Amino acid sequence: MSDPLRDACTADGRYSFDAYRFLFESLETALTLAGREAESGASRHVSGPELLEGMRALAERMFGPLAAEVWRSWGVYATIDWGRIVFVLVDAKLLNRQESDTLDQFKDVFDFAEAFELHYEPQLPTELGANPLPDEG
């Protein structure tokens, strides 16, 4: 039996299947951050920057400061790469697009090193009794 997501990834050949799967996993996070998780139909649509914000948030939670390295291991080096994946999925009819959606919306939205590495602050789970560290400044 054919897997349409894997087929789209294989046909494109530029990025790891994990990147395609991660993008789909990020959609719910993007919808929640955009305040549209309860919407339906076209009202659930997120823009390129909104999708990228959901992806950034999920990657930060899943991979912490290693997120940029994980993305690079999938062949994703800049936010424009995520846009290319989105449009592969649109062409494969796995995602819908609106007339206003363009690849340029994904260009230089954020720098991976800055987003994940430079400003990373570890978050210890509070249920384990972790207390925030006091500011030293």
Image (cartoon, helix red, strand yellow):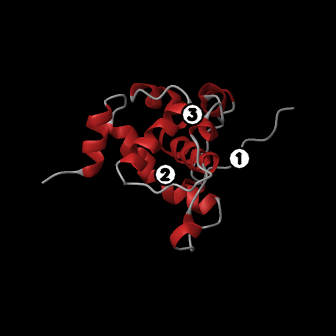
Whether residues under marks 1 and 2 lie with C-beta atoms below 8 angstroms apart, the answer is no
Q: Can you give x and y, in whole percent of width and height, for residue 90 in the image?
A: 42, 49
> Which quarter shows the N terminus?
bottom left
Q: Determine the residue located farthest toward the front in the rendered image.
A: 99
The residue that appears at 26% across and 44% down in the rendered structure is 6
Q: Please indicate whether residue 7 sits to the left or right of residue 35 in the image.
A: left
Q: In the structure shown, which secondary structural element does the residue marked by tag 3 occupy?
A: helix
Q: In the structure shown, which secondary structural element does the residue marked by tag 2 occupy?
A: helix
Q: Please indicate whether residue 63 sits to the left or right of residue 53 in the image.
A: left
Q: In this view, does 62 lie above or below 76?
A: below
Q: Determine the residue located farthest toward the left in the rendered image.
A: 1
Alpha carbon separation for disc pair 1 and 3: 32 Å
Give, as a three-letter code, the residue at label 2: Ser
Crowd band around label 2 with a 10 angstrom C-alpha radius: few (<14), some (14–19), many (20+): some
Q: First in sequence, mark 1 or 3: give its number.
A: 3
Q: First in sequence, mark 1 or 2: give its number.
A: 2
Name the residue that disc number 2 marks: 26
Q: First in sequence, mark 2 or 3: give its number.
A: 2
The residue that appears at 46% across and 31% down in the rendered structure is 71
Name the residue that disc number 3 marks: 79
The residue that appears at 41% across and 26% down in the rendered structure is 75
Give, as a three-letter code, the residue at label 3: Thr
Q: In this view, does 38 lie above or below 113?
A: below
Number of numbered callouts drawn: 3
Q: Can you give x and y, in whole percent of width and height, for residue 8 in the image?
A: 30, 42
Name the residue that disc number 1 marks: 132
